[in-house]
Amino acid sequence: MKTTIAGVSVWLALLSCPVLSASAATPYVSGSAALSMPRDSERTPRSYDTGYLLTGAVGLDSGLYRLEAALGYQKNGINNSQRTVSMTTYMGNGAIDLGLPLASLKPYITAGAGLADVEEEHDNGSIVGDTVFAWQIGAGAGFEVASLVTVDLQYRYFATTDPELADQKKYTIDTHNVMLGLRVGF
């Protein structure tokens, strides 16, 4: 619960920053691939395998602040079984760039909140799912490789409220994600 409150607080703080002016902001699209490393479930004993995460986003970049809408897909195995857990995420994210305006390397911090459709596929092929609140925080650095083209390397901690999955039990899901992405403005 404390981590959920912390994530929501960071997200709300980002939203309270000055709103991006549409005429001064540069629209962009981005995509990322990540290594997803979930922690073991605390609520009901379960351990997850390392998996992958793919995300795509559209957003506005003011040079100091970024706001975006992101769609993601994550898949992890459940240790010692043929079961898998996958999530489709719908996130609203904000970022604050910390670098100098003319530098090609720009560190940043990011936070977001949204929904996750969590599905568990059982050995027999049946699927059990739940939609839950999700949030994330992270930090990274963007390297401008050309005008309006940035390569991003970032770390994100992602968590959800407890979904009800197998045997109608609640499980904790939180992951450490190391992401490599490309952001292109237009």
Image: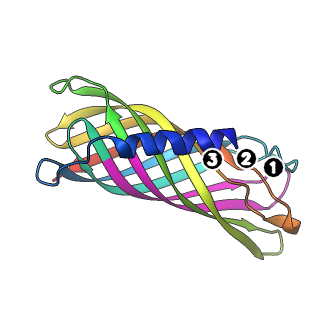
State if disc 3 and disc 1 touch (CB < 8 Å): no
Colouring: rainbow
Q: Mark 2 points at which residue?
A: 49
- Look at label 1 and name its amino acid: Asn
State if disc 2 and disc 1 touch (CB < 8 Å): yes
- Look at label 2 and name its amino acid: Asp
Q: Point out residue 120 in the picture as x, y percentages from the top left corner.
A: 73, 65
The nearer-to-camera label among 2 and 3 is: 3
- Marks 1/2: CA–CA distance: 6 Å
Q: In this view, does 38 lie above or below 31?
A: above
Going from N to C along the chain, the mark reached first, 1 or 3, is: 1
Q: Mark 3 points at which residue?
A: 159
Q: Name the residue under label 1.
A: 79
Q: Residue at x 45, y 32 (%)?
A: 139
Circle 1 packing at 10 Å, graded few (<14), some (14-19), many (20+), is some
- Marks 1/3: CA–CA distance: 19 Å
Q: Which residue is drawn at 36% across and 40% down?
A: 95
Circle 2 packing at 10 Å, graded few (<14), some (14-19), many (20+), is some
Q: In this view, does 104 lie above or below 14?
A: above
Question: 177 or 108: which is nearer to us?
Answer: 108
- Look at label 3 and name its amino acid: Ala
Going from N to C along the chain, the mark reached first, 2 or 3, is: 2
* Res. 4 image quadrant: top right
